[in-house]
Amino acid sequence: MVWLDLLINGICLGGLYGVLGVGLALVIGVMRFVNISHGEFIVMASFLGVYVSALLPGLNPLWLLVPVAVVFFFVGYGVQAVLFNRVVTAPDFLAPILLTFGFSIVLQNVMFESFGTDVRALTAGGLARQSIAIGSVSIGVLPLITLALAILFFVVLQLVIARTGFGRAIRATADNRDVARLMGIKPTRIFNITMGFALALAAVAGLLLAMRATFTPFSGLSNLLVAFEVIVIGGFGSFWGALLGGFLLGVAQLVGLYFDPDAGIFYVHLAFFAVVLFRPQGLMGIKLP
Amino acid sequence: MKLLEARGLSVFYGDLQALFDIAVAVEPGQTVALIGANGAGKTTFLKSIAGLIASKRGSIAFEGAEIGALPAEQIARLGLTLVPEGRLLFQNLTIEENLLIGAYTGRKGYWNLGRVYELFPAMAARGREMPFVLSGGEQQMVAIGRALMANPRLLLADEISQGLAPVVVDQIYKSFPAIRAEGTSIIIVEQEVRRAAAASDYTYCLLKGRVTLEGRSKDLSFDQLSHAYFGA
Ligand SMILES: Nc1ncnc2c1ncn2[C@@H]1O[C@H](COP(=O)(O)OP(=O)(O)OP(=O)(O)O)[C@@H](O)[C@H]1O
Ligand SMILES: [Mg+2]
């Protein structure tokens, strides 16, 4: 029963990891652009959550998900339009990496200056302690909500991309920018909206993460690492792969912690390493020739 | 008023100049052929008209308005649509989605999904398949259909017979009268001189980035054409 317990709670945590990765995957898939500062945006959302919660004591932080996601949509749109679009089409592949790496350092220091290095968390009140017992397995209500939200976001994202006219334009732009322009699609606008979606997802991840674990202005890097591991494990460009990758990492973390309570997220990296070693194309990726 | 008028058009790839002082005009309703050997600059001309190449000098007027400085996505909205060389269908979109995205500009007119399927009936049953399953000729039909979905005033067709069997090419050229009948003018880029002359009202011949011959297609002799084509 311990195993079942670990598995279910690992999957709940993994859903969150999936959300952590899918925004980054979306951006890489659509604009071949690696946003090194993705993790810092996740932390900024956590800070925004803590800040607003302090202003509105007693409010369940789950209510913040939608407004914070909306705010971060516009932040993403703006950052892409003002900053990132300058290098998206740069012939030098280093330009986007250097820009977003530099930007991540700027964001870290802005957060450090504004909030200091205190370890923070978002208290979900009674919700954090509630759990449902099914047979002998007990599942936390908050992790369950997290999982449900993660699946909801994946389904919605998938539907938007696969079924809507806008999603069609996103896929066309990802395939061939110039031909997309011949259709009347303005790639930079697609990129702005894509980054908006990506950072909205990052914001959701940031809030949910802050309800589970503590963070500091320097937590961005470990978020980025997990996000990368999720999408590499999933197989680049595969949305469902990212969710699956998240599940695997979540289960690995909880199983690891059970045997080795001081391990932190060491076993997450170990699982990542094992997948890369034995299945380098990722779980759902296409095997490279 | 001319539908399209390019004057003194020079186009550059970095330090390399690909087109020199080109003057090309298209009257409403006309089909214009652009012929020339490999590397003559035909694709460069079409791409610069469509706005995909920014580094250019001279003027390009479309329906009387200067479009030389506009980006491709804005030119597309004006009703100037390019069928690119090599078809370049979106590989991650189904055949039907490839057609639908052609209508992204929302331009109204005769052409819609049903009408494109009428024009190329073989495609109608295959809308849910991915483009890679299609033969070259079928891909070309989808590429033309995708362009028609924008209800263009001017259709630029770059080497639509490239790599296709002659019977398939015939089939594709048979769709042109229906396209013209809806008031769309066409520029066809073609390597095969005779076919280009037969399908067009007016012909331009390009050689090494310069117009070496132009005239009404039926007035040009094969000798004149081959001379201008090879520069011999
Ligand atoms: N992206 C590019 N960068 C640099 N030079 C280019 C580029 N594209 C074309 N050129 C050069 O410009 C000239 C004209 O090329 P273009 O593709 O327009 O010829 P074309 O007439 O379409 O030939 P083809 O029949 O082979 O399609 C050629 O010398 C070619 O090498
Ligand atoms: Mg060409």
Image (cartoon, helix red, strand yellow):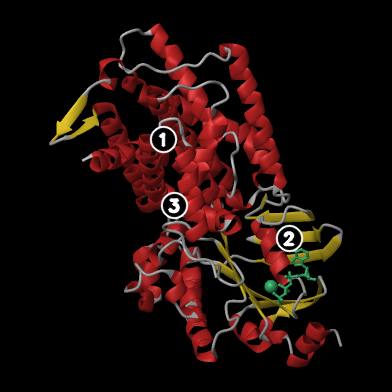
Residue sitting at 41 percent across and 38 percent down? A17
Residue B190, position as x, y percentages in the image: 65, 79
Q: Are marks 2 and 3 on the same chain?
A: no
Q: Is residue B174 left or right of residue B33?
A: left
Residue sitting at 37 percent across and 68 percent down? B115
Q: Which residue is mark 2?
A: B6
Helix, strand, or loop for circle 1?
loop
Closer to the camera in the image, B67 or A247: A247
| Marks 3, 1: nearer the viewer | 1
Residue B5, position as x, y percentages in the image: 70, 60
Q: Chain of mark 3?
A: A
Label 3 amino acid? Gly
Residue sitting at 49 percent across and 33 percent down? A199
Tell which quarter ligand 1 is in.
bottom right
How far is disc 3 from disc 1 in space, using C-alphas?
26 Å
- Neighbour tally class for label 3: few under 14, some 14-19, many 20 plus, Cα within 10 Å: many
Which label sits on residue A260?
A: 1
Q: Quadrant of the N terminus of chain A?
A: top left
Residue B149, position as x, y percentages in the image: 45, 61
**Label 3 CB sits under 8 Å from any ligand 1 atom:** no
User: Dots 2 and 1: beta carbons under 8 Å?
Assistant: no
Q: Chain of mark 2?
A: B
Task: Say if residue A209 shows up in the picture.
Answer: yes
Q: Is residue B201 left or right of residue A159?
A: right
Helix, strand, or loop for circle 3?
helix
Q: Quadrant of the C terminus of chain A?
A: bottom right
Q: Residue furthest front?
A: A259
Eyeballing the image, is A28 above or below B7?
A: above
Q: Earlier in the sequence, mark 3 or mark 1?
A: 3
Closer to the camera in the image, B115 or B109: B115
Label 1 amino acid? Asp
